[in-house]
Image (cartoon, rainbow, N blue to C red):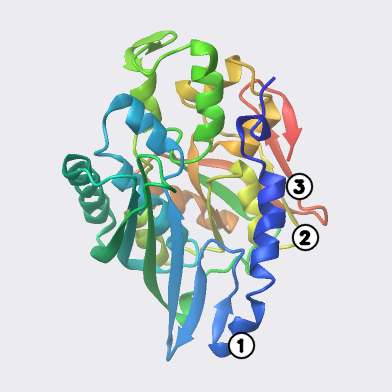
C-alpha cells in the first residue's frame, strides 16, 4: 500500500506548517476590512459595496509529468484553473491574474508553450492576464515552477461563505477532466517508480489513451457554469473546489455539518489504475477528485435546476446530501461499493 505521505507529501505536516505561518499574520487582518480569513478557498476584503476576492495557487508536480512528456502547453491552463476555481467558491467573478514563473535557466521555447496555456486558460475563464514575474533561480529551482494569483469581484450580498448550508441540502458534483493538478506526487510514485510504467504506455484496458496524456489533461475551468448558476435564481449555499485533500475539502465550509456521498460517477480510468497499483481506497478519496472537480450545495428543490444549468457546459450529478454532524465526517460510497469515512 502506498500513501501520499510515502510519496513525499505529508498533509498533516502541511496543516501544522500552514498554521505556524498564518498564526504570525493574524494581526494584519486588522489593517483592512476582511470578510473571510484564510482557510476558505479564497479570501475577501470589503471595498465599498463590493468584496474583492483573492486566491493564489500553482501547478505543483504536474510540471514533472510535462517534463517527461516534453510538452508544456497545458500547464498554464492548470495554473489559471486552480486559481479561478477557488475564486468561484466565494461567489466571486474572476477578473484578472498575474503569473510567477521561476526557472533554472530561461528557455524561450518552453516559455512560449507555457504562455500558450496561460492564454487558453484565460480565454476559457474570461479573465485578463495583466502581468507577472519571471525569475532565474538556478540554485533553487530545477527546470521551472509556475504559480499565479487572481482577483475577483462580488457584491457583498452575493458572497457565498457556506454559512447558509443546511441539513438536507443536496450535493451536486460537476465532472472533472481527470486528475487535475493535485496528487501528482502520489500518482507518479505508484505509476513510475521502479519503472513499472512509462508516460507513453497505454492505460490498461484503454489502448488509445497514453498514461502521460491522461495525467496532463488540463484542470477543468468552471467559471461559465458556476457564474451562470450564481446569476440565476438558484439558491447556492456552498461551493467546494475538490483539489488537494480530495473530498475533505467539503469540511472547509461550515462547522457541525457532515456529508453523505452515495452517488458518485464511476471514476476516470486513471484513478482506477492508480488504485490498482496499491493506493488504499480511503486515501484515494482523501487525495484525488475521483471524477468530481467542484461540488455545489443547494436546497433540495433547486437541485434539478442546478443540474440543468451546469449541464449546458459540464456533466453534473446529484452525489449526496448535507447532514448535521458535529464530527464533520464525510461518508462516501466508493466505486468498490464499500463505505468509507474521511
Residue 225 shows in the view: no
How far is mark 3 from mark 1, CA to CA?
33 Å
Q: Quadrant of residue 202?
A: top left
- Residue corresponding to mark 3: 329
Left-right relation of 108 to 141? left
**Which residue in the rendered view is the most extreme toward the bottom?**
48
Tell me the quadrant of the picture where the C terminus can be found: top right
What percent of the width, then of the height, locates residue 31?
A: 56, 89
Of labels 2 and 1, earlier in sequence is 1
**Label 3 crowd bin: few (<14), some (14–19), many (20+), radius 10 Å:** many
Seen from the viewer's position, the closer of residues 292 and 81 is: 81
Image position of 36 with respect to 115: above or below:
below
Q: Does any portion of residue 293 appear in the rendered image?
A: yes
The circle drawn on residue 236 is none
Residue count near mark 2 (Cα–Cα under 10 Å), binned few <14, some 14–19, many ≥20: some
Residue 17 locus on image (x, y percent):
68, 56
> What x and y, as percent, mark residue 314?
36, 42
Mark 2 near mark 1, Cβ–Cβ under 8 Å?
A: no
Quarter of the N terminus within the rendering: top right
Q: Does residue 270 appear left or right of residue 208 in this picture? A: right
Q: Image height check: is 107 above or below 151?
A: above
For the point 54% across and 87% down, the residue is: 33
Q: Which residue is mark 2?
A: 256
Label 3: which secondary element: loop
Question: What residue sits right under mark 1 in the picture?
Answer: 30
Q: Residue at x 56, y 79 (%)?
A: 35
Q: Secondary structure at mark 1?
A: helix
Amino acid at each position: 500500500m502506498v500513501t501520499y505521505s510515502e510519496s513525499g507529501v505529508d498533509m498533516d505536516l502541511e496543516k501544522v506548517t500552514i498554521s505556524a505561518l498564518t498564526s504570525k499574520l493574524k494581526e494584519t487582518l486588522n489593517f483592512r476590512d476582511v470578510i473571510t480569513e484564510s482557510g476558505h478557498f479564497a479570501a475577501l476584503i470589503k471595498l465599498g459595496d463590493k468584496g474583492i476576492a483573492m486566491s493564489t495557487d500553482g501547478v505543483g508536480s504536474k510540471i514533472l509529468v510535462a517534463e517527461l512528456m516534453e510538452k508544456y502547453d497545458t500547464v498554464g491552463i492548470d495554473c489559471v484553473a486552480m486559481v479561478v476555481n477557488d475564486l468561484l467558491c466565494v461567489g466571486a467573478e474572476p477578473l484578472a491574474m498575474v503569473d510567477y514563473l521561476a526557472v533554472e535557466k530561461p528557455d524561450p521555447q518552453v516559455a512560449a508553450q507555457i504562455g500558450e496555456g496561460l492564454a487558453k486558460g484565460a480565454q476559457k475563464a474570461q479573465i485578463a492576464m495583466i502581468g507577472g514575474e519571471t525569475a532565474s533561480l538556478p540554485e533553487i529551482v530545477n527546470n521551472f515552477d509556475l504559480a499565479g494569483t487572481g482577483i475577483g469581484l462580488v457584491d457583498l450580498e452575493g458572497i457565498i461563505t457556506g454559512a447558509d448550508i443546511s441539513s438536507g441540502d443536496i450535493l451536486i458534483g460537476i465532472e472533472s477532466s481527470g486528475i487535475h493538478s493535485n496528487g501528482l506526487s502520489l500518482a507518479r510514485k505508484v505509476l513510475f517508480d521502479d519503472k513499472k510504467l512509462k508516460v507513453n504506455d497505454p492505460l490498461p484496458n484503454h489502448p488509445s489513451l497514453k498514461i502521460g496524456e491522461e495525467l496532463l489533461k488540463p484542470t477543468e475551468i468552471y467559471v461559465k457554469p458556476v457564474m451562470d448558476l450564481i446569476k440565476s435564481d438558484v439558491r447556492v449555499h456552498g461551493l467546494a473546489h475538490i483539489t488537494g485533500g480530495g473530498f475533505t475539502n467539503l469540511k472547509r465550509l461550515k462547522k457541525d455539518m457532515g456529508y453523505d456521498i452515495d452517488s458518485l460517477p464511476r471514476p476516470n480510468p486513471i484513478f482506477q489504475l492508480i488504485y490498482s497499483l496499491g493506493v488504499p481506497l480511503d486515501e484515494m478519496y482523501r487525495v484525488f477528485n475521483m471524477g468530481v472537480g467542484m461540488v455545489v450545495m443547494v436546497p433540495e428543490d433547486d437541485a434539478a435546476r442546478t443540474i440543468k444549468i451546469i449541464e449546458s457546459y459540464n456533466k453534473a450529478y446529484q452525489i449526496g446530501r448535507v447532514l448535521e454532524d458535529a464530527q464533520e465526517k464525510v461518508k462516501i460510497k466508493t466505486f468498490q461499493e464499500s463505505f468509507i469515512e474521511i
